[in-house]
Image (cartoon, rainbow, N blue to C red):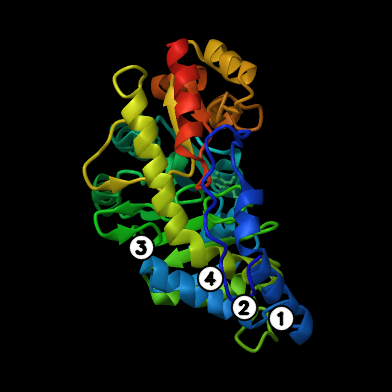
Amino acid sequence: MTNQSETAPLNATDGDGPIQFIDLKAQQARIRNKIDARIKAVLDHGAYINGPELGELEETLCNFTGAADCVGVASGTDSLIIAMLGESLGAGDAVFIPTFTYNATANAVLLTGATPIFVDVTTDTFNMDVADLAMKIERVLEEGRLRPRMIIPVDLFGLPADYPRISKIAKEYNLTIMADAAQSFGGMLGNTRVGALAEISSTSFFPGKGLGAYGDAGALFTTDKAKGEIWRSIRWHGTDAQRKESIRVGFNGRLDSMQAAVLLEKLAIFPEELELRIKHAAQYDARLSGKVKLPSKVEGFQSSNGYYSLTVPNREVVQAALKEASIPSAVYYTQPLHEMEAFKPYAGDTPFTGADTLAEEIMSLPMHPYLTEGQIDRVCDVVLSVS
Ligand SMILES: Cc1ncc(COP(=O)(O)O)c(C=O)c1O
């Protein structure tokens, strides 16, 4: 039993226990006392909205990421929408997004009235194909129907997109970059953390994410302090600093004190959890490399290892063998966005060969800080037995 000021130590097990895809229970057991104390503090002060936890969280997130400002919001989807409203995006604007991502990226663009232009992804990194991005921008300009305004690279499974190359293109065409870092909080490029890699970064604290709340939450990061004030207004119905007059259109996109309280305690152990994820990914890599196709390692790019994903031509067989061994696996995503009913009208007429391949072959293995070496070995044994 730990007292309220202690974080329980990691309990190493022998690898025989059941394997979870993501183990939120093991994490909670380590910090339950601290979370209880944080929640009690919110109940005691009663400021359920805009309590002191929100400012504390925003400041701690700024320090961790190196961003100039951070604004807590209600979800990763709201953060995308708030940032786009902040840039006055709307009808007639083109926003370039990868077609192989969660549907929230496209939904957010369409909800602002702008038009998503789908870009293919590479089968090496699973991220935006920069050559296809340049081609799509040129096509939009040639057609002359829409104004290119923003690029939203998605850091799929935790690996930062190719921001150095994407930034060059953004400069050339005068476009804003917003990183959809919903899956990559904690990732790095060189010495720079996700959150400070682009002018705007958006993340999600959905419970299953690397840093997850106990409900919905998200955050925006910026390297330009002026944006933070605009986002604080939009998340509170577009009001002025005194919250009297609406000075722009906004909505209720706030992050509440309870979620901020939970996130503060989870953030305290996040650096250690990140190291464990990196260690587990290295063990997977060492066992599987050369035998199955793993994403390419690019010098300087450090994934947050939100998910451990690989491509296998016989995905159904691999998943069935894992299931037989009581090992969970998942497929993100079985369909690229350009094929989904809601987004087909924006599919255009160019091929998406990278995304189509991934939809057929991608899969994710169990990944969370509380896996043991024995458990990872068991997963690899099964994958290798059918590869
Ligand atoms: C790439 C991506 N973008 C956006 C989101 C939306 O985040 P949320 O579920 O917090 O709204 C997610 C979350 O699942 C995501 O994976």
Q: Check if mark 2's residue and mark 1's residue have beta carbons within 8 Å.
A: yes
Q: Amino acid at mark 1?
A: Ala
Separation (CA) of disc 2 from disc 1: 10 Å
- Towards the viewer: 78 or 366: 366
Q: Which residue is mark 1?
A: 41
Camera-nearest label, 4 or 1: 1
Disc nearer the start of the sequence (3/2): 2
Residue 61 is situated, as x and y percent measured from the top left of the image, at: 47, 69
Q: Amino acid at mark 3?
A: Ala
Separation (CA) of disc 4 from disc 1: 22 Å
Q: Check if mark 1's residue and mark 3's residue have beta carbons within 8 Å.
A: no
Separation (CA) of disc 4 from disc 3: 13 Å
Q: Amino acid at mark 2?
A: Glu
Camera-nearest label, 2 or 4: 2
Disc nearer the start of the sequence (4/3): 4
Separation (CA) of disc 1 from disc 3: 31 Å
Q: Which residue is mark 3?
A: 196
Disc nearer the start of the sequence (4/1): 1
**Can you say whether 260 is above or below 53 in the image?**
above
Residue at horizontal 57 percent and vertical 59 percent from the top? 79
Q: Which mark is residue 53?
A: 2
Q: Disc 1 on helix, strand or loop?
A: helix
Residue at horizontal 65 percent and vertical 57 percent from the top? 29
Q: Residue furthest bottom?
A: 242
Q: Which mark is residue 71?
A: 4
Residue 111 is situated, as x and y percent measured from the top left of the image, at: 63, 49
